[in-house]
Amino acid sequence: RSYMHAVATVKVRDLLPATVVQALIATYNIDADMKIAQRHPVHKRPVIMTGDCVHIWKKIVNALELSSKASAQRMLAYPDDDGNLCPMSLKMLENVWTAMDGGRAGLHRGQTLPIFKKLGVNHFEKTNFSRMRVYLAVQVMSGTMASALDSLIESTPSEREKPEAMRNPQRYLHNHTQYKPLLEFVRHFNAYVDVCNGFDYEHPDLRTNVHAAASVDAPLPKELSKQLEFLKWVTDWKERIDASERIESEKKRWCFLPWQSWEDIQHLILGYTVLVLCYCGEQNQKAFPLRVPNLKCHLQTLNQDRVENHFSHVRSSSTNPTALQAQRASTLAGGIRVQNVQANCGRTPGAGSRRHNPSDRMLKKSRHGQRPHAARLRCGGNVH
């Protein structure tokens, strides 16, 4: 099992009012017995344990890539309402890109998607380096890809128009009905990424912080509902595979996402939902006694890029540092700071700003080219 599954001890149903839990089960089919938190040893309040959204995005696209390889056991498939198995793979998305002439031309009806030109060969021919790039993962599963998929599915000629398809075979999708589950997957994935990036659907030029209402009967914030809709779709996908009679029992696990990715998705979405409902929102001491006044949560800031950047600074002095070298490198790095504002998933809010990174000001070299004494970053022998 995953690390969070082994450490967490508190279930979702133990952290929220029964009315809210029943509504979440009825609307989004969540697993209320999922353990997502542990009690603090001192004040006994729940410590929510969640994942990192950017790494989940990459793992989902990597699973689609494995599903494209004949030598891999992973073969993602979605059982439709008729019982047919519809494959889902990165190769199918590449077919969409190819049908659009690599993004350089529109469809046979003169339609065009200029933003589609962002995609390139690196999005589909993966290497060890490109698999770690988040923008390559989210762009290949973007709303533009969903629009192109939808247009190609609708524009695929019928049996009476086959001669036209034979003259331009690259402009159409073969077996286009099998692309419909993939289209739904891309749409839900794109909406989930937009929410994680803090995108406001009503005001695209603004960034929003999630804030829940005081009443237990009030509707969820749209940021939470979009995430839970993505979780509901993936849960329905898993239930369809488990109930399918066309898939052998020992092969069912290869038709779905890896179990690590599946647990990470549940931990991230359910953990963030519980975090907002428990701590962020209007005051209601009876139903939500742990809420902090005027506290709002921004999902975009809940990532581990700062920690990874700190480890990168430590490894810059030595690729395999000893304990003493790591301690000295941590002292010079000034604890956790952000030097590369692009990081691994784009610009982080406040990254590179002196107001958000006071250690950068202390770490600037003096006129003689020497860094300030390490003791300035210490307090009682502990590195801050």
Image (cartoon, helix red, strand yellow):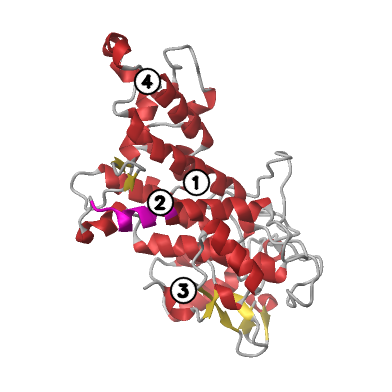
Sequence-earlier tag: 3 or 2: 3
Q: Residue at x 31, y 9 (%)?
A: 164
Q: Residue at x 43, y 23 (%)?
A: 154
Q: CA distance from mark 4 to mark 3?
A: 45 Å
- In this view, the mark in front (2 or 1): 1
Sequence-earlier tag: 1 or 4: 4
Q: CA distance from mark 3 to mark 2?
A: 19 Å
| 239 magenta-colored | yes
Q: Does 338 sit left or right of 80 as displayed?
A: right
Looking at the picture, tell me which residue is in the foreground, 201 or 247: 247
Q: CA distance from mark 2 to mark 1?
A: 10 Å
Sequence-earlier tag: 4 or 3: 3
The residue identified by callout 3 is 4
The picture quadrant where one finds residue 221 is bottom right
Sequence-earlier tag: 2 or 4: 2
Q: Position of residue 163 (x, y in %)?
A: 27, 9
The residue identified by callout 4 is 156
- Which residues are drawn in magenta? 236-245
Q: CA distance from mark 1 to mark 3?
A: 23 Å
| 186 magenta-colored | no
> Which quadrant would the C terminus be assigned to in this image?
bottom right
How many C-alpha atoms fall within 10 Å of the one at disc 1: few (<14), some, or many (≥20)? many
Q: Position of residue 54 (x, y in %)?
A: 50, 54
Determine whether label 2 and label 1 are within 8 Å by CB: yes
Q: Position of residue 26 (x, y in %)?
A: 56, 60
Sequence-earlier tag: 2 or 1: 2
Sequence-earlier tag: 1 or 3: 3
In what element is the residue under mark 4? Answer: loop
Q: Residue at x 59, y 45 (%)?
A: 194
The residue identified by callout 1 is 189
Determine whether label 4 and label 3 are within 8 Å by CB: no
The residue identified by callout 2 is 60
